Amino acid sequence: MILEIHLDILEGETKLLKAKTYALKLLSKRDYFKEELRKKLIQKGFSEGEIAETIKYLEDNEYINDEKLLQRYKEKYSQKGFSYVKLKSKLYSKGYILDDEFSYEEELKSALNRLKKYKKEKDFYSIVKYLINRGFSYQVAKEATNIFLNEAK
């Protein structure tokens, strides 16, 4: 009886160790959001208890941090010239719901970064349409286009 209890405890600890090892292996390749990692562990067949304990261990040891990862995604998408809508969609696919929005200045900066790759001989309306089709608001598209065309002169 006591032996069976010890075996059950050891088996539980072994499964938990496997969950932590698998999570660390995933994190060695790239960063994950908490929910994204949770889905991976579920797919691998770990129990909810093992997953919760693994996630807690990773957070306590700062292997995962959704807020820091979110900031890196925001910077990356802004530099590449993607809109808030595109970022929100990408994060949603990774299991992260974005509540806050880009400020107007961040959106404008992102739109201007997008226009760096754009041909300058286009007219005002074509450029505005181009930005709107990429998820930018009309106000941001209009102001970014004005700045872009004034710099081109």
Image: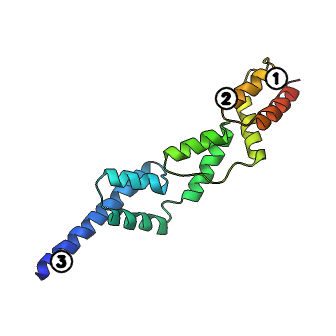
Q: Identify residue type, mark 1.
A: Phe
User: At x 73% / y 25%, what residue is drawn?
Assistant: 129
Identify the element where label 2 is drawn: loop
Disc 1 to disc 3, C-alpha distance: 74 Å
Q: Residue furthest top?
A: 121
Residues 124 and 68: in front is 124
- Taking the spot 43% from the left edge, 67% from the top edge, the residue there is 56
> Which of 113/132 is in front?
132
Is 15 positioned to the left or the right of 125 in the image? left
Indicate which disc residue 133 carries.
2
Q: Nearer the viewer, mark 3 or mark 2?
A: 2
Count of marks, rendered view: 3
Query: Element at badge 1?
Result: helix
Screen quadrant of the C terminus: top right
Give SS at disc 3.
helix
State whether residue 49 is above or below residue 100.
below
